[in-house]
Amino acid sequence: NWLFDLEQTQLAYPDSTKVILANCKCNLHNLMTGYLDERQKTTTPWVFEAEYLNKRPRKVDKSFYAMLNEDQHGYSNFNYNYYDTIGKVPTSKGDADMVEDKPLILGIDWGGVINSMAIAQHIPGEFRVLKSMYVLSDKGETQDDLAQQFIKYYASKTLKTVYIFYDNTGNVRTGNTRVTRAEQFKALLTAAGWTVILRTEGGANVRHSNKHYLFEVILKEDNPRLPIFRINKYNARDLLISMQNTQIVTAYDGTIKKDKSSEKKLRASDRQLATDLSDALDTAVYGLFRDTLRSAGISLPDSRFQ
């Protein structure tokens, strides 16, 4: 969508910006025979339409985050004084939406192909998603690289306190260590000067139906006990796309589940567009606000996993 935002800028200020839109069929003479057919078979429809046919991303049917509205919930907020010269390396110094004296909240989804992280803050009346990060095993990266990516980006933050939410895979010991994946991640952040509070220790993973319902209530923004939800649509672009294109499937018992097929269909190099990043955010939102629903007398669909 950033490309189409530029298009709107061109319409408003034609002398300042020039945007040319075309799909890759204009470049067929430079592509191998059958290239587009192969790409269409191996990518999800929305990725193919956006990246190869240059079509605007559209909201999917049966969306898991049906109430998500980019215009309402999305925002951008940069510190342009930091980017006053060309070549500045992006860090949190360039983010005007981060509150320096508030802790960060991390939702992490551990995996073999991809390790995903959503970074947020809970400030009075608002849950703000600042950024998303990920590392891909296809590039030889591990969860340690994700930790270092976080440490480097937020090195200048004043209050170095972080709360980490994750599913039960974070409590599993890796094959080459005696500590769990979460403990290994914590150790790296602690060594870099961060105070780390792990908020998920044991227990069964949460049912998708409960996460879906909680997001419906939060995104609707009509419950005064819950904060409004906002997401930085540039720094958390991959996470936003992951949410926008996550669909619902019905389980054998009739309950709602998240369609995880994109995790198998997408190429390893495009895995950040699958459901993993949305899973990372789910763990943080559910961990923070499940009890708020309870106190408001709102019951989740599956009481066995509340």
Image (spheres, rainbow, N blue to C red):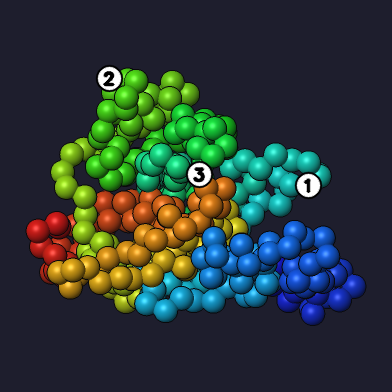
What crowding class fits label 2: few (fewer than 14 Cα within 10 Å), some (14-19), or many (20 or more)? few
Q: Going 54% across and 76% down the picture, which residue do you hit?
A: 58
Going from the N terminus, do you reach mark 2 or mark 1 first?
Answer: 1
Where's residue 296, x and y in %?
Answer: 17, 68
Instruction: Give yes or no for contact between labels 2 and 1 (Cβ–Cβ under 8 Å).
Output: no
For disc 2, the marked residue is: 178
Query: What element does badge 2 sit on?
Result: loop
Amino acid carrying label 3: it is: Tyr
Which residue is label 1 attached to?
84
> Image quarter for residue 164?
top left
Residue 269 placement (x, y as % from top left)? 57, 48
Nearer to the camera, 35 or 137: 35
Residue identifier under label 3: 134
Q: Is residue 104 visible?
A: no
Type of amino acid under label 2: Arg
Q: For mark 3, does the 10 Å Cα neighbourhood hold few (<14), some (14 to 19), or many (20 or more) residues?
A: many
Cα distance between the residues tagged 2 and 1: 47 Å
Q: Nearer the viewer, residue 24 or 221?
A: 24
Residue at horizontal 43%, vertical 21%? Answer: 191
For the residues labelled 3 and 1, say whether their Cβ atoms are less than 8 Å apart. Answer: no
Q: Quadrant of the N terminus?
A: bottom right
Q: Position of residue 160 (x, y in %)?
A: 44, 33
Counting from the top left corner in percent of width and height, residue 129 is at: 46, 55
Image quarter hosting the C terminus = bottom left
Q: Residue at x 32, y 76 (%)?
A: 222
* Above or below, comparing residue 73 to residue 42 in the picture: below
Front position among marks 2 and 1: 2
Question: Where is residue 55, by image quadrant?
Answer: bottom right
Q: CA distance from mark 3 to mark 1?
A: 27 Å
